[in-house]
Image (tube, grey):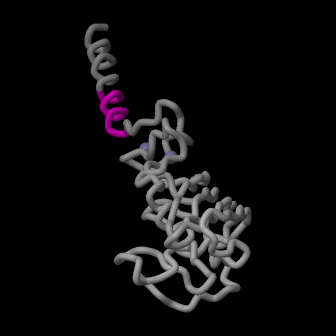
Amino acid sequence: MTLRNLDPRAPWVISTHDLGRRPGSMLQITRTLPAPAEIGVDMIGVPRDADVELEIRLEAVMEGVLVTGTARTPLRGECARCLEPVTSETEVGFQELFFYSAEDAAEGDSILNGELLDLEPTFRDAVVLTLPLSPVCSEDCTGLCVECGIRLADAEPDHKHEVIDARWAKLQGLIPEHNNDQES
Ligand SMILES: [Zn+2]
Ligand SMILES: [Zn+2]
C-alpha cells in the first residue's frame, strides 16, 4: 500500500469530490488521457502520450470508492517474426477499490489520497496483462529468410538460396554435353 500526496493536476489523478461519500452514489467519467510513459513488454507497448479513451464509473461503497471501467489505447511495437513495425490497439477492463482509510486496506490495496485517486497503476497493470509476448504484423507472417535476413513477405514467392545448387547444375550440365561429344 502506498500513501503519497497526489498532484490534482496529474492527468491520471481523478477527483472524487463530486461523488461524495454516501454509499450508493455514482459518477460516470469519460475522458481522453495521455498514456503514461513506459507501459509495455519487450516487443510492444503503449506509445507515451498516446490518446487513451477512458470510461469509468465511480461508486461510493462503505469502505471506499469502487472504480469500474474500460480504457482503449493504441499500441506500437515490432513483429516478433519479421521485425516490421506493428500498430494496433487494445481495450482493457478493470475494477479497483480505493479505500478511504489505510487501516481498512491490506498490503497492495489502493488508498484514496483525500478526495483523489490515482488510476495510473490500475491502468498500467490492466494493459500489461493483455500485451502479446510475440506480436505479429499478420497471423500468416512468414518472418525473415534464415540465409539472408530478407523479409519473406517482400521477397519472391520462391525465394531460396541456390548459389551452390546452381553451380552443381552447371557442372551437371557439362557432363551430358561431354558425353554427347564423345558419342558424336
Ligand atoms: Zn511480420
Ligand atoms: Zn534469403
Q: Residue at x 55, y 67 (%)?
A: 61
Residue 53, percent from left and from top: 69, 60
Residue reaching furthest to the bottom: 5
Q: Nearer the viewer, residue 65 or 163?
A: 65
What x and y, as percent, mark residue 169?
34, 27
**Residue at 51 percent of width and 90 percent of height:** 4
Residue 159 against residue 86 in the figure, above or below: above
Measured along the vertical axis of the image, is residue 73 above or below residue 5?
above
Total numbered badges shown on the rendered structure = 0
Please state which of residues 171 and 131 is positioned toward the viewer in this rendering. 131
Occupied quadrant, residue 52: bottom right
User: Which residue is drawn at the image coordinates 51% and 57% (left, top)?
Assistant: 78
Quadrant that contains the N terminus: bottom left
Q: Is residue 155 above or below residue 43?
A: above
Residue 168 lies within the magenta run: yes
Counting from the top left corner in percent of width and height, residue 111 is at 49, 79
Residue 93 lies, in percent from the top left, at 55, 54
| In the foreground, 100 or 150 | 100
Residue at the spot 49% in from the left edge and 66% down from the top edge: 40
Horizontal placement of 101 versus 31: left or right?
A: left
Side (left or right) of 151 relative to 16: left
Q: Residue furthest top?
A: 184
By secondary structure, the bulk of the magenta-drawn segment is best described as: helix
- Which residue is at the front of the view, 78 or 92? 92
Q: Report the side of 78 relative to 60 (left or right).
A: left
Q: Is residue 111 magenta?
A: no
Magenta region, residue range: 163-171
User: Which quadrant of the rendered structure holds the C terminus?
Assistant: top left
